[in-house]
Amino acid sequence: MTMANIHGEPHLLKQIRALAEERLELLRTSGANFGLGEKEHDRLKSIEHELDETYKLLRESRAERDRQRFSR
């Protein structure tokens, strides 16, 4: 059982939205303040990594759902 099956797509989509909103806010802040500080830059890198991982889980979840659906 993958992590995606445990959490489900609605949870993953909610997490993606929250991370994307936080990323956008950091990017807006960077534009208003002429760049990011080290702490904000580290958080941005962390958010981007989390987004990559969450999208990976979402793709795995959808692939498993499709595999089950089309293997009947």
Image (tube, grey):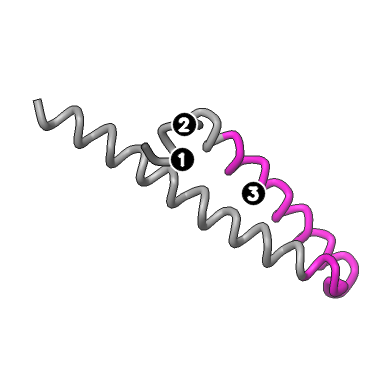
**Is 4 or 34 nearer to us in this picture?**
4
Q: Which residue lies furthest to the right in this view?
A: 33
Please report the bounds of the magenta region as a residue range.
Answer: 14-41
Q: Say whether marks 1 and 2 touch (CB < 8 Å).
A: yes
Choose the circle earlier in sequence order: 1 or 3: 1
Specify the quadrant that holds the N terminus: top left
Secondary structure of residue under mark 3: helix
Residue 36 is labelled as none
Secondary structure of residue under mark 2: helix
| Membership of 68 in magenta stretch | no
Residue occupying the point 19% across, 36% down: 67
Residue occupying the point 46% across, 30% down: 8
Report crowding for label 2: few under 14, some 14 to 19, many 20 or more residues within 10 A (C-alpha).
Answer: few
From the top left corner, tell me how far across and down residue 47 is, in percent: 66, 57
| Image quadrant assignment for residue 70 | top left
Residue type beneath disc 3: Ala
Total marks placed: 3
Q: Distance between the residues labelled 1 and 2?
A: 5 Å
Q: Say whether marks 1 and 3 touch (CB < 8 Å).
A: no
Secondary structure of residue under mark 1: helix
Q: Distance between the residues labelled 1 and 3?
A: 20 Å
| Membership of 39 in magenta stretch | yes
Report crowding for label 3: few under 14, some 14 to 19, many 20 or more residues within 10 A (C-alpha).
Answer: some
Residue 20 is labelled as 3
- Please state which of the two labelled residues, at mark 1 or mark 3, is closer to the viewer: 1
From the top left corner, tell me how far across and down residue 45 is, in percent: 68, 67
- Please state which of the two labelled residues, at mark 3 or mark 2, is closer to the viewer: 2
Which residue is identified by label 1? Answer: 3
Residue type beneath disc 1: Met
Q: Is residue 38 left or right of residue 66?
A: right
